[in-house]
Amino acid sequence: MGVFSRMSDIINSNINSMLEKAEDPEKIARLIIQEMEDTLVEVRTSAARSIADKKDLTRQLDKYRHLYEEWDAKAKLAIEKGREDLARGALIEKQKNLRKAETIEKEFEIVEEAIEKANSDMTKLQAKLDEAKAKHKALTMRRLTAESRIKVRQKVVDTKIDDALTRYELVERKVDALEAEVDSYDLGKGLTLGDAFVALEAEEAVEAELAELKRRAKGGASKPAAKPAKPAPAKAADGDDEDAA
C-alpha cells in the first residue's frame, strides 16, 4: 500500500467519524493537517532508513567487487605459475563474490527506487501540507470575520429595533394627543338617544304652548284665560282646538 493510499484511509476514517459527530469544519481541517504532518514524519523516517541501507549496501558492493577482482588476479597468477588447481579454486571464489555483488546490486536498485519514491512522496506531501495550512488559515480568517460581522450586525439590529420602537411610541403619543384634542371639541355636543327624545318632546311642548297663546290672542282679552296646557304632542293640541270651537 502506498503512503498516500494509507494516509487517505486514515484521514477519511477520522473525517467520517467526526462528521458523524457533527464536528466543525475547522476542527476537521486541523485533523487533516495533523495526519499529513504525521505521515510526512513517517515518510522521512522511512527515507532515512533507506538512505542508511543504501550506504551499507554501497560498502558491501565495494567489498565484493574488490574481492571479485582480487580472486580474478589470483586465478591469472596461478595459471601463469602452472597451478591449475589453485586457479580453479580462485575462479570458484571469484564467482561467489560476483554472485554476492550482483545480489547486492539488485538490493541497491530497490533501495534507490524506495528513496526516490520517498523523496517524490515527501515533495508532493509537503506541497499538499502547505496548501492545507494555507486553506486552514484562510478558513480561520473567514470564520473570525464572519463571527465579527455577526456581532456587529446583531448590535446594529438591536439598536435599530430599539430606535424604531422608541419612534413608534412617540408617534403613538402624538396620535393620542390629536385624538384627545378632537374629543375635547365634541364635549357637551354629543347627545344620546334618550337625550334626543327628551329634546324632541320639549320642542313639541313649546310649539303647543305657542299655539295656545296665538288662539287666546285671537279670542280677545275679555275671555278668561284658560289653564296652561300640559306639554303634549302636536295632535293632542289640535284636539283641544276642536273642543274649544
Image: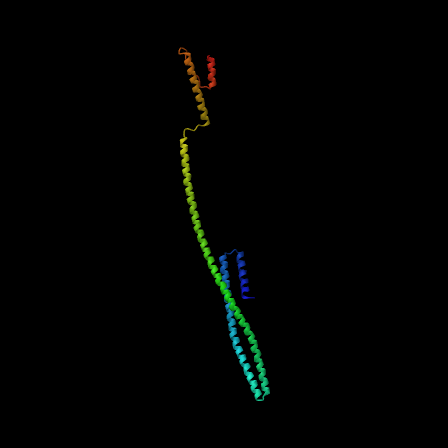
Please state, as top left, top right, bottom left or bottom right, where the N terminus lies in the image. bottom right
| Left or right of residue 162: residue 125 | right
Is residue 142 visible to the viewer in this orientation of the structure? yes
Tell which of 84 and 222 is nearer to you: 84
Residue 218 in the image: state x and y as whole percent. 42, 13
User: At 56% from the left edge and 85% from the top edge, which residue is drawn?
Assistant: 76
Q: Residue furthest top?
A: 222
Is residue 42 visible to the viewer in this orientation of the structure? no
Residue 192 in the image: state x and y as whole percent. 45, 28
Image quadrant assignment for residue 180: top left
Above or below residue 106? Residue 217 is above
User: At 57% from the left edge and 79% from the top edge, which residue is drawn?
Assistant: 98
| Left or right of residue 221: residue 65 | right
User: At 57% from the left edge and 77% from the top edge, which residue is drawn?
Assistant: 102
Residue 100 in the image: state x and y as whole percent. 57, 78
Above or below residue 34? Residue 239 is above
User: At 43% from the left edge and 46% from the top edge, which residue is drawn?
Assistant: 160
Residue 25 in the image: state x and y as whole percent. 50, 57
Above or below residue 21? Residue 167 is above
